[in-house]
Amino acid sequence: PLLDAEKIHRAAKPLVGFSDITAMLLWQQNCAGLVGIHGPMLVGATDEQIEETLRLLGGELDLPNVLQGRAGTKGVAQGRLTGGTLSVVAASLGTPWEVNTQGAILCIEEVNEQPYKLDRYLQQLKAAGKLDDLAGIALGQFTDCCDERYPAPSAEEVLREVFSEFDIPLVSHLPVGHAADNRPWPMGVQSEIDGDKGTLAVLEAAVGKAV
């Protein structure tokens, strides 16, 4: 194999990043059984973001670590966090690192994808059964996900339409993704989503934990 999952599991080195690194985070979670950090990279990150990421890696963040978004579908649920950049999550289907959403809170974000493409990715996940057993849906930033030729439907309208049939908590506009405010969150740890308050709370430390 290209990567030795057992060796990487033993090494337990932290992996931090977002966007295309979503594929590596999913591989690390599903194949090596390790928590990874979906979060800012050094280039373009603010001092505050770097400090929060370092505190997360050092096990120094107070728990629960709450990310504030906007209230969506009501309800409260707990589950493992998984997800990342939507297009890469969809591309994981059929691979050994295919996203595992059973009982999970799916946290997704995207950049520079037109609304019809967002719909295509979501319909692919839906057809694969990946939206059936979710505990909750956490939507980050969908930056520049628009089509000047066809202003409607918007990215937000597409997202809400697809998820409207699922009676589970939903939070939107979380500070994660391809935007100025890109806060870190650990993939694979237990978390709580509150659709009434618009929050996603990380309940477990990211370090020293296998998934």
Image (cartoon, helix red, strand yellow):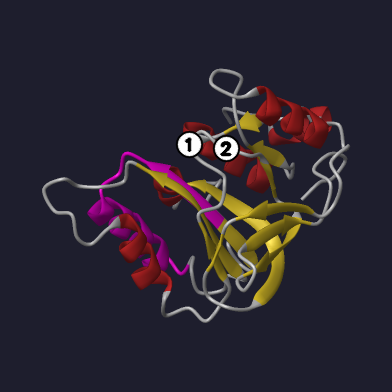
Give the numbered dot on residue 182.
Answer: 2
Q: Which residue is mark 1?
A: 179
Q: Residue pushed farthest top?
A: 43
Image spot of residue 39 (x, y percent): 62, 35
Report if the CB atoms under discs 1 and 2 are less than 8 Å apart: yes
Give the numbered dot on residue 41.
Answer: none
Name above or below for residue 146 compared with residue 76: above
In which image quadrant can residue 36 be found? top right
Name above or below for residue 146 compared with residue 12: below
> Gap in Å between the C-alphas at discs 1 and 2?
6 Å
Image quadrant where one finds the N terminus = top right
- In this view of the protein, which residue sits in the foreground, 197 or 27? 197
Stretch in magenta? 107-129
Image spot of residue 196 (x, y percent): 62, 74
Number of residues whose C-alpha sits closer than 10 Å to that of mark 1, classed few (under 14), some (14–19) or many (20 or more): some
Residue at 48% of width from left, 35% of height from top?
19
**155 on left or right of 94:** left
Residue at 73% of width from left, 58% of height from top?
201
In which image quadrant can residue 50 be found? top right
Image spot of residue 70 (x, y percent): 54, 62
Q: Amino acid at mark 1?
A: Ala
Image spot of residue 62 (x, y percent): 86, 46
Q: Quick one: SS at disc 2? A: loop
Q: Quick one: SS at disc 1? A: loop
Q: Is residue 209 magenta?
A: no
**109 on left or right of 186:** left
**Residue 101, visible in the rendered structure:** yes
Q: Amino acid at mark 2?
A: Asn
- In this view of the protein, which residue sits in the foreground, 17 or 181? 181
